[in-house]
């Protein structure tokens, strides 16, 4: 058996490879849907959380209000979302997925989810608890690091975008 440092390095490499493979799936999905990655992130949030107002969607996606409006406009033009009046507040507007977009997302990501569930079923309850803890910790690490990078970029005045 590998020593601890080697095992930690192997797990870290496996996580990096997993993240790269996830990126490949998302890139293929965005291309299939004819949208960019930011718009795909918005679709994913709407799929996971249901209809939401533009402010909540933008905050969840990490977008400025102007970028949120632009994304919603692009998604609406592509037929993936629509704006609807809120049932609670008729002055409010919610963004929701179209039926067609929901069906396409299921077509694209459904097999990934089913196969993933089959893989998870192979693990014991103790292993699943460990995986859950690891992934939850990893999620918080990534969110915190994204915030750190954005804050450092803002302090530095932002870097030129190419």
Image (spheres, helix red, strand yellow):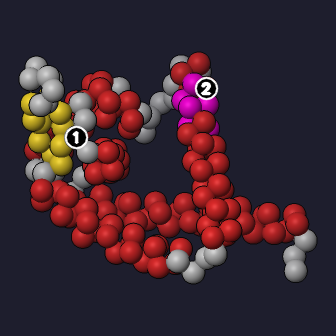
Q: CA distance from mark 2 to mark 1?
A: 32 Å
Labels 2, 1: front one: 1
Left or right of 76? Residue 109 is right
The residue beneath circle 2 is 152
Left or right of 22? Residue 144 is right
Q: Quadrant location of residue 70?
A: top left
Determine the main secondary structure of the stretch shown in magenta.
helix
The residue beneath circle 1 is 51
Q: Which residues are magenta?
A: 145-151
Mark 2, residues whose alpha carbon is within 10 Å: few (<14), some, or many (≥20)? few
> Can you give x and y, in whole percent of width and height, for residue 124 in the image?
64, 75
> Can you give x and y, in whole percent of width and height, for residue 101 in the image?
17, 57
Mark 1, residues whose alpha carbon is within 10 Å: few (<14), some, or many (≥20)? many
Comparing 62 with 112, the one in front is 112
| Residue drawn at x 75%, y 69% as measured from the top left | 10
| Residue drawn at x 25%, y 62% as measured from the top left | 105
Q: Quadrant location of residue 11?
A: bottom right
Q: Is residue 36 visible?
A: no
> Can you give x and y, in whole percent of width and height, for residue 53 in the image?
23, 30
């Amino acid at each position: 058996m590998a020593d601890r440092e080697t095992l930690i390095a192997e797990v870290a490499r496996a996580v990096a490879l997993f993240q790269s493979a996830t990126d490949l799936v998302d890139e293929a999905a965005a291309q299939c849907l004819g949208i960019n990655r930011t718009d795909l992130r918005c679709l994913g949030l709407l799929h996971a959380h249901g209809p939401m107002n533009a402010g909540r969607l933008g905050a969840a996606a990490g977008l400025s209000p102007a970028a949120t409006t632009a994304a919603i406009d692009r998604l609406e033009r592509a037929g993936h979302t629509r704006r609807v009046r809120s049932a609670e507040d008729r002055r409010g507007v919610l963004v929701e997925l179209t039926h067609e977009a929901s069906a396409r997302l299921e077509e694209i990501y459904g097999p990934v989810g089913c196969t993933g569930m089959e893989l998870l079923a192979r693990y014991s309850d103790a292993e699943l608890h460990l995986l859950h803890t690891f992934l939850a910790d990893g999620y918080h690490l990534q969110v915190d690091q994204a915030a750190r990078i954005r804050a450092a970029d803002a302090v530095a005045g932002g870097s030129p975008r190419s």
